[in-house]
Amino acid sequence: MECVPNFSEGRNLKKIKKIFQAALRQAQGEPARVFGLEYNKDHNRMLFTIVGAPSDVLASVFAAIKTATQLIDMNKHHGEHPRIGATDVVPFVPVAGVSLDDCVLLADKLARKVAKELKVPVYLYEAAAKKPENKSLADIRKGEYEGLKIKLRKPDYGPDKLHPTAGAIVIGARKYLIAFNVNLNTADVSVAKKIAAKVREKGGGLSGVKALGFKVGGLAQVSMNLTDFEKTNFDAAFAAVAREAEKFGVEIKGSEIYGMIPLEALVKAVKNSFKAMTFKSDQVLEKRIYENQRSKD
Amino acid sequence: MECVPNFSEGRNLKKIKKIFQAALRQAQGEPARVFGLEYNKDHNRMLFTIVGAPSDVLASVFAAIKTATQLIDMNKHHGEHPRIGATDVVPFVPVAGVSLDDCVLLADKLARKVAKELKVPVYLYEAAAKKPENKSLADIRKGEYEGLKIKLRKPDYGPDKLHPTAGAIVIGARKYLIAFNVNLNTADVSVAKKIAAKVREKGGGLSGVKALGFKVGGLAQVSMNLTDFEKTNFDAAFAAVAREAEKFGVEIKGSEIYGMIPLEALVKAVKNSFKAMTFKSDQVLEKRIYENQRSKD
């Protein structure tokens, strides 16, 4: 089980450390691992990753949420990224044999604990959503903290008013998300926007693909979120962008896998690209070493 | 550090288990991992993998060699695969930050221990070779056990005569070897043989590539050993075979990664195939989990 909590603090290093260390301290001596701290000043936001058995992940992320609730005052928070609370969003993600249903159960358990012990209103999103209108994170965050202060959206758990300083929290469960960008050999951002509109699921494109066109470092970029790599992996997304780009007479300059990616996605891309249909992740040396280590522990 | 000892027993399950378990027992409570036991009746041969810190790997493989020396009688051994001893060949392979030089040192240490304690003559091969004529395993094994019985090649360590039942041992150090086969959409094995002759290093082809043409399951197959994937990885080998096959009007039906492959090779293939030049193995979730686990242990 993996959990990637996002907090509304990306500037004050002391606070960032305290929140991260709360998760780390809780995980000490437990089999949960806490790593990958990232923070951004413009977004004024931080995130890290917790991996382990469900109960250990829950204890670790709760410790961080509690600390963030005490340290962050949303009334003084400014940043480019949309947010509604000190702990803004907490997705649980299935990895290594855990199912999405297990993640839904854990999200619900954490939501009840947060509402009861920290008195923060909680919304459940994506696979954990209790109402169809709460499936999309963007819908829940509409209006942001300032908007909810004026008119609160009915929470799934917790008080019917915002926490005075920590606001509200979105908790949920979703499949592993791969952030994949393809850079085009043109400065014309309109090409990237047109390609994005073609390849994204909403435009009748690839299953599970969200896509936008940006200009990055002077070049047009098709920036994608692959929300279900078992349906559309990065190799298929790359091929689709290349196909559309060709229509504009534009070449692909390079691609970028942003952040973490599960081994299964690499294995799947290699299988497809080299017609290596019998290839399995069990053949990857590091995986075998790791699994043997676990079975001995 | 990785070690893949090969023993001349692939039929008697009791003996196979005893040899494997000797390595396993020695590794109990140590950080060395023993896994991936494979054996083949036609070859009358077994192998498995040991991974861990150098001293632990050495202790584990020595326990297995000692057991094989006691159990296997080469005078009664028949099999298709070339061999000169009960423990036939023991390569040390660098993985996870270990250098090839470290592997050479460990091979030498094991060779001296085997010669002294088990009274078996030892040849050092590949990167660990003390003489240029012993670099190639095929050269050392020429004539096999039966040939050495008549005229012994001068060993690097140990007695100047074969062990009465266990024969001799080849120990050495080499880079990670990837076994990669490409199946062609033709039954004409001569096409595979011609392509193999073109792509192999000896024919002026790809660096570190050994290649042969076979007929497997009714189809022609180019069977390759990639002895240095940092120079020629499987994606480059695939592309070269495809290019040559096109000249014969033949298509690639599929490819096969045989046995274990290091994560770095997958990452390298993905970087090349999708122009993802910034992609690193540290972005693979399972690697991060594994490394965090080690740093906490």
Image (cartoon, coloured by chain):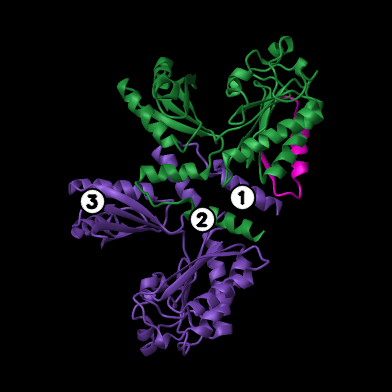
Chain colours: A purple, B green
Q: Is residue B29 magenta?
A: yes
The residue to which callout 2 is attached is B285
Image: magenta residue range: B11-37
Q: Would you say A285 lies left or right of A238 here?
A: right
Q: Is residue A153 left or right of residue A182?
A: right
**Does mark 2 fall on the same chain as mark 3?**
no
Residue type, mark 2 in image: Leu
Above/below status of A260 relative to B38:
below
Q: Quadrant of residue B78?
A: top right
Mark closer to the chain start, 1 or 3: 3
Q: Secondary structure at mark 2?
A: helix
Residue at (40, 87) in percent of width and height: A76
Q: CA distance from mark 2 to mark 1?
A: 12 Å
Q: Is residue A245 left or right of residue B117?
A: left
- Dot 1: chain letter: A
Circle 3 residues within 10 Å: few <14, some 14–19, many ≥20: some
Discs 1 and 3 lie in a common subunit: yes
Q: Chain of mark 3?
A: A
Q: Position of residue A8 (x, y in %)?
A: 44, 78
Picture quadrant of residue B255? top left
- Mark 3–mark 2 Cα distance, whole angstroms, equals 30 Å
Please give the name of the residue rendered at 54% of the width and 33% of the height, measured from the top-left corner. B177
